[in-house]
Image: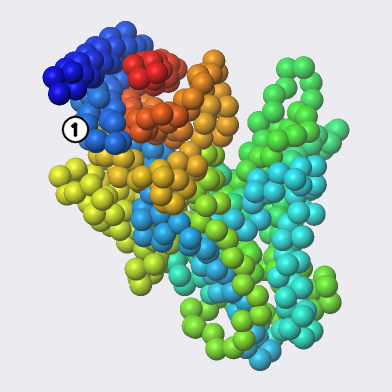
Amino acid sequence: MRIFQYLLLLSAFFTQQTLADLQSDVERIVSNASLNKGHASIHIIDTETNAPLASINSSKMMIPASNQKLLTTGSALHVLGPSFHFETKLIKDGKNVHIVGDGDPTFGDMELYPELEGTSERAFLGRVLDEWVNAIKQSGSSSIDTLFINDSIFDQNFIHPTWPADQINNWYCAQVAGVNYHLNVIHFYPSPVNGTRASLGTYSPAIEWLTINNRTSSKTGKKDKSSFWVARLPNSNEMTARGNVKATHKEPVKVAFHDPPMVFAQSLASRLRKHGITVKDVKRTRNTPIGDVIFVKRTPLQLALMRANVDSHNMYAEALIKRIAAATGVQGSFEEGSEIVERSVAQRIGHANPLTVADGSGMSRKNQLTTQALCQWLASFDIEEPAGEMLLDSLATPGEGTLRNRFKTFDIDGVQVHAKSGYLNGVSTLSGYITFEHRAPIAFSIFVNGVKGTVKGAKNMHEALVLATIHSFN
């Protein structure tokens, strides 16, 4: 009995010594970091006991940037459940056909089909639409009076009011709607044409009704530079291509388009006509159709979680925050979704942790969160259970997604880092789990706000803190 008590005391001593050493290491790393006037908040906890392992300024409210997606995706699992599927329906009502949206962000996302690498985007999008066309054909329709698009599961506030107004045409501020298509952006691949305006290339989607004014140049001299960009008038799809095109663009220039549900409906109508099916009109409706379901497009929640976290895709996160609102019986909106995220956090970790949720992606600087709350949120998911396992699997590991250039020398047997990075001007964050083969995971959250200039020093500090934590327990 005395030996057993001695071993318990010895174990407790070494545990306390490890915690003291880790706290000391964390303080040293932070004090030596080049944060360019930025201030840091750190919290590290053992998910088995919820006991803090190290902490600095962990109760300070800060901007989380894309670490906000951890709240959004976790709330989606909490509210919708890991077995949830988006279900977009085609309903035939006499001579009319209704597209009834469910907020699915995946339609036309070529990144979900790596096996199609090398396939042109237009060919890929044709295959996506043909799935719908074939369902309509098989229903016996050769002529449609009206193709209705019903996106009423979400409101029509496509962009968040606190997103930067001068960036809403960029892909990372793409609109979010009850029906989404091709990440709600157009891809341009311009190329120079000697002596005249540049060619805009085979842009995708192929939106024939789109108005594009070409005001480009094609100067290819040694002193010339590429400066191609596309402006879009507010609340319209009238676009103007500007700037110089010095060489053919291999990577797309991505421009957010307006009103994704109507773009999808018009694209489907165009594809139907090419297949010989007449479509007389395309309209939006919010009326619940009565008719026969002729097609259901089902998409697992896991796909949306992966794109939101591994690749930090904003539109996916915003679709999720609106969808969890819709799951409660209200129309999906930023405001309702934000309230549900706050409620989900309170249900899982209590009301003692203050936070302000503005959007789902972290683009808004109105989001406010503490590293302590985020750590406790992560620890509230048991990675041995379906929801926790799915959340863990949705996070990037070194060498993939937003961590493709992080932890470059990381190679520790039996240990893995699963994390979500975040960046806004002056903000750099990293939060997630460290998993071990023979112990419970460690949750960590590291925020740096107020950086003046480069965040390289903050990123280096992130990695040093994670590695120090690993070495304390490995």
Residue occupying the far bottom of the picture? 94
Q: Classify 236 as above or below 437.
A: below
**Image coordinates for residue 222, horizontal then vertical, percent:** 77, 17
> Residue 313: percent from the left, percent from the top?
52, 44
Foreground residue among 357 and 160: 357
- Left or right, residue 286 beside residue 368: right
The extreme front residue here reads: 1
- Point out the residue furthest to the right here: 194
Quarter that holds the C terminus: top left
Residue 392 or residue 16, whichever sits in front = 16
Classify residue 122 as left or right of residue 341.
right
Residue at 22% x, 29% y is 52
Colour approach in the figure: rainbow
Residue at which label 1 appears:
59
Picture quadrant of residue 425: top left
Q: Position of residue 303 (x, y in %)?
A: 56, 51
User: Mark 1 belongs to which amino acid?
Assistant: Ser
Residue sitting at x 86%, y 33%: 194
- Residue 27: x percent and y percent? 25, 13
Q: The N terminus lies in which quarter of the figure?
A: top left
State whether residue 367 appears in this view: no
Give the SS element for disc 1. loop
Classify residue 35 as left or right of residue 309.
left
- Residue at x-position 65% and y-position 75%: 295
Give the class, few, some or many, for how many residues have Cα within 10 Å of label 1's Cα (few <14, many ≥20). Answer: some
Q: In the picture, residue 127 is in which quadrant?
A: bottom right
Where 417 falls versus 290 (above or below)?
above
48 vs 273, nearest the viewer: 48
Q: Identify the residue at image location x=40%, y=43%.
A: 383
Residue 111 visible in image: yes
